[in-house]
Amino acid sequence: MLSDPRPLGPEEQNDLLLQITLLLSHSLPEGWQEVAVSYRALGSHSEMLGQIQRMGQRPSSHEPPPDLAKRFQRLRAGMYRPGVGTWFTATYRLTSSSGYSVAYDQDNEPAWVSAPPESARDEELRMFPRDAQHIPEWWGRPPGGGAPDEAARAPAGRGAGAPTGPPSTPASAPAHGQAHRPTGATVSIAKPYDGTQPDGTPIFQRPPVPPEARDAVVRYLADAPIILSARSFSEDLLAPGRPANVPLTYHTDGTWIWPGSVGYYLRAHGAPPQPELVAHIRDNGFRLPALPENVETAALENLYRYFQSGDES
């Protein structure tokens, strides 16, 4: 659930960013080249602004879909570090040619359009306690009384400061094993694992894939059309010391949709996908079916409805 207060691991953070990408892309007009969204929060006070660049036109304001705010709120809570706090501003940028990027600022005052009340600082400390050395200097000024730099002022900028990064001790997660079938849809959406241990390690409570079938299942999962991609990689949660090489993608064969991490964890660690998905692949003879031209568009629509429903956890 989006209101789940538990810390988020790197893969979960990236999954929320993929959701933001898909939800935002559905709101964009023809001819867009770049869009930026700035989400700012202190306590329960928040605001979200967008800016869009269309081909041959000057940048103009763009109203982001309201559902984005819930994802940013979840990111902000999930990226909290005890005693250190969490970010105040997230600046997200999506371009038509190179995908998305995001920057977080946990030090500088947001460039408020509507300044928060004085009580927001106390509320922030109750929600996200900080040690004294991590309380920013601008908290000694009235809200909105600072002079934020130009990068923080413009939604299209990358923002200042460094990302807070993933939390150090992720809490246990609710079960992830049940395939989700969006209402009125004809596809099932697979989960990469069944939950997490207190240290964030994924839990797989599934029957293993027979050794003689593993390579064929891996090929099927990896070769299926990609319908959504972050053009980057996430940390291997079963081998944290490795370079980030878990693909941040979603694939489909027209009947199922699954994240790229499903095939990765099977190939790298033998961690099995959901048995229903494995049975489906076996029933297909381990060969991808011929897909109609509109299958990727239809799958994206299913994924879009799935993210909108808020059932992705």
Image (tube, rainbow, N blue to C red):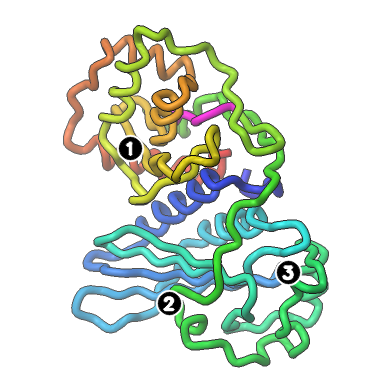
Q: Nearer the viewer, residue 45 or 108?
A: 108
| Left-right relation of 42 to 263 | right
Q: Quadrant of residue 297?
A: top left
Three-letter amino acid code of the residue under disc 2: Gly
Q: Quadrant of residue 216?
A: top left
| Left-right relation of 199 to 40 | right
Task: Give the residue at mark 3.
Answer: 43
Q: Residue at x 32, y 32 (%)?
A: 252
Q: Position of residue 67 (x, y in %)?
A: 52, 57
Q: Residue at x 63, y 70 (%)?
A: 106
Kindly report which numbered mark, 1 or 3, lies closer to the viewer in this rendering: 3
Q: How many marks?
A: 3
Looking at the magenta stretch, what is its main secondary structure?
loop
**Mark 3 falls on what kind of element?**
loop
Neighbours of disc 2 within 10 Å: few (<14), some (14-19), many (20+): some
Task: Give the residue at mark 2.
Answer: 157
Q: Position of residue 141 (x, y in %)?
A: 74, 90
Q: CA distance from mark 3 to mark 2?
A: 23 Å
The N terminus - image quarter: top right
Q: Residue at x 28, y 14 (%)?
A: 286
Q: Position of residue 268 (x, y in %)?
A: 42, 27
The numbered dot on residue 5 is none
Q: Considering only vertical position in the picture, is 174 above or below 91?
A: above
Q: Residue at x 57, y 83 (%)?
A: 111
Question: Does the stretch in magenta take in 118?
Answer: no
Task: Give the residue at mark 1.
Answer: 299
Range covered by the magenta-colored residues: 188-194
| Mark earlier in primary sequence (1, 3) | 3
Q: Position of residue 215 (x, y in %)?
A: 32, 17
CB within 8 Å, label 1 to label 3: no
